[in-house]
Image (cartoon, grey):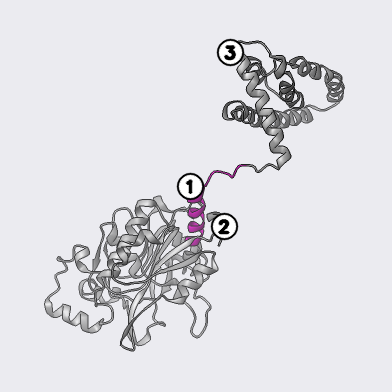
Amino acid sequence: MASDLSVILPRVLIVSRRTLRKNKFVDFVGEYHLDLIVGYGAVPVIIPRVTGVHRLLESFEPIHGVLLCEGEDIDPSRYEAEHSGLSPEEFEEIKRLHASDTAIDKEKDSIELGLAKLCLERNIPYLGICRGSQVLNVACGGTLYQDIGKELQKKRPQCERVVHIDYDNYDGHRHAVKVLPNTPLNHWFQESLDGEKMEILVNSYHHQGVKILAQRFVPMAFAPDGLVEGFYDPDAYNPEEGKFIMGLQFHPERMRRPDSDEFDYPGCPSAYQEFVKAVIAYQKKVNGSTALPPKPLQLDKEMEKRRKIIVRSFSIAKDMYTTGRGMNSSKESELEAGAEFLESNTVLSLQQENRLKQMGATVRNGSSYFQRLKMNEERERAAKNLMTKMSVEQLSELMSFYRMMGQICSEILDQKLRGIVNDFEPS
């Protein structure tokens, strides 16, 4: 298994949904979500909805993104639901009409709200679909309609009422939403928007929805009855920089033509594409900030032996300088290695040259360094003659290039000299 995190695909956490099959609970996640996450370059990591998992979320690190999707109604105690004004009889009717959704799953609530808050705290990319958008809103202090039909529809004229769930035409049902300009949703569906109406048709599988949108969010789309169908945090949206916080009430991954995998609109998969783009960028950003230091250069035996000799030579020179003692004849041969090193590394700045003199590194054969510089005078004269024939533009480009190369060489050599003189001790 690869140990370098930079070569591991980013991880997107998805919480499973629990259902009853053959008298036993089974956890599942819709494959459309998984296909899109994998297809755009990330790895889905499924968090099982089992008791106690909400206390183990750190065990799923590293987390590069979170996708929360379908599920049951969120526990009303998690938001201000006491002002719904619904009677006990109305609650019973709601439970009867939406039996599969009104069975509260408190463990799933704890897991998903915990993940949402973690994303908000650490700026981890988050995409909420349907229930996932409601979780995001509640996590930020927003509220929900406990039932759209009972709380919202009855306040609207007949022409503005919207069917948000149709059990008889479950996947085929669509209703219009108006997309707001200058939003990601507008950008994704720009080619498909219906003229001045700025509308697209979306699927709908919910009886709850956003009542009060949390302050940090900006709406992206509304249904004709005024229900928020999409929202995002503009201050936390820049996929190229690893930023993505968004909720969609509809299911773009399921907006497909009958008996086909073809999407209703070209923009349908864009939410997943941009989300994964943010996930990948976030992983790179995290890995860059926690990158392990580079492994030290491994030298062969001969090079290692040579390195130790040079280190020894510079250490003797440094000792001569700091103690003020003259050169011991027995050490003369050991100093030769340092002198030879200096002769072969002549690209030194004045500052580096002075520092080497001060350290005593040029005590012996230092003059050979300057002799070598004089030998280059003829080459310099030849270069000057050539440059007089060059144009101003050519000279300017040449000067910029060599200035850059000189700076690079100076910085690298300075680092090497610091390492040799200050970091190593004689064996």
Measured Cα–Cα span from mark 3 to mark 2? 51 Å
For badge 2, the amino acid type reads: Val
Disc 3: which residue: 323
**Where is residue 421, by image quadrant?**
top right
Q: CA distance from mark 3 to mark 1?
A: 43 Å
Residue 374 falls left or right of residue 324: right
Membership of 272 in magenta stretch: no
**Mark 2 highlights which residue?**
7
Relative depth, front residue between 349 and 229: 349
Which numbered circle lies on residue 290? 1
Query: Which residue is the extreme one toward the front?
Result: 330
Q: Residues within 10 Å of mark 2 (few under 14, many from 20)?
A: few
Alpha carbon of mark 2 to alpha carbon of mark 1: how far? 14 Å
Relative depth, front residue between 202 and 13:
13
Is residue 105 shown to the viewer in this render? Answer: yes
Residue 189 in view in this figure:
no
Q: Position of residue 245 (x, y in %)?
A: 40, 57
For marks 3 and 1, the one nearer the N-term is 1
> Mark 3 or mark 2, which has the lower sequence index?
2
Please state the horizontal and vertical placement of residue 78, each as a whole percent of the image: 22, 64
The answer to the question of whether label 3 and label 2 lie on touching residues, with beta carbons closer than 8 A, is no
The span shown in magenta is 275-296
Picture residue at 49% right of the left edge, 61% below the top: 276
Please tell me which residue is depicted at 48% across the width and 57% down the height of the picture: 278
Q: Is residue 305 left or right of residue 238?
A: right
Task: Please state if 218 lies on the left or on the right of 400 as rendered.
Answer: left
